[in-house]
Amino acid sequence: MHLTIVAVPVIALLAILAAVRPTWYLKNKWLTTGLAALAVVSTAVTNSTGEALMVLKGASEENPGIYADHALYAKGVIISAGALLGLFLLQHFLAIKTGRMHMIIQVLLVIVAIISTVATGYEGAALVWR
C-alpha cells in the first residue's frame, strides 16, 4: 500500500518533468517507464488486497457499502497510472514524437493521478476513524 502512495506521485512528477523537458525523458526513459510499471503493479496489488479486505468486512464489489467512495477513487488511481504507463510505453518503444497534445494529455493524467491518490488516502483514513 505505501509503495503505491509514494510511487504514483513520483511517477506523476517524472511525467511532468518528461512533458516539460523531453530531452530529459530521452536520457531517462528506462527509469521513467520502469517506475511507471512499478506504480501500476503496486496499485493493482493494493487494489486487489483492498477488494479482498472489503469482502472480509462484509461488503462486495457489487454492494461496497461504506467503502464505495474509497473503491471508486482507487479505480481512478489504477486507471490514471495505467494510462501514464501506456503513454510512456508508446513513447518509449514506438519512438512517438511528443507534441503539445501529448504534453497536455500527460499533464491531465498527472492531475487525475495525484487527485485520485489523495482522495483514496483521505477516504481510507476516514474509514479507519469511523
Image: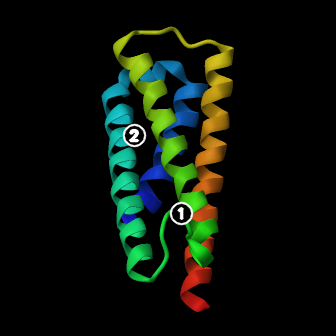
Image quarter where the N terminus lies is: bottom left
Q: Nearer the viewer, residue 100 or 22?
A: 100
Residue 106, percent from left and from top: 60, 30
The numbered mark at residue 36 is 2
- Packing grade of label 1 (10 A; few <14, some 14-19, many >=20) is few
Q: Position of residue 91 (x, y in %)?
A: 44, 17
Q: Is residue 124 above or below residue 69?
A: below
Question: Which residue matches tag 1?
Answer: 62
Give me the residue at 40% from left, 54% from top. 43
Asked whether, in this view, residue 10 is left or right of residue 28, the answer is: right
Query: Residue 63 in the image: x percent, y percent?
Result: 56, 69
Q: Residue at x 65, y 54 (%)?
A: 115
Residue 5, visible in the rendered structure: yes
Give the mark, 2 or 1, whose residue is nearer the N terminus. Answer: 2
Q: Which residue is painted at 42% across and 66% down in the image?
A: 51
Q: Quadrant of residue 50?
A: bottom left
Determine the secondary structure under disc 2. Answer: helix
Place residue 30 in its image quadrant.
Answer: top left
Specify few, some or many for label 2: CA neighbours under 10 Å numbering under 14, 14-19, or 20 or more: many
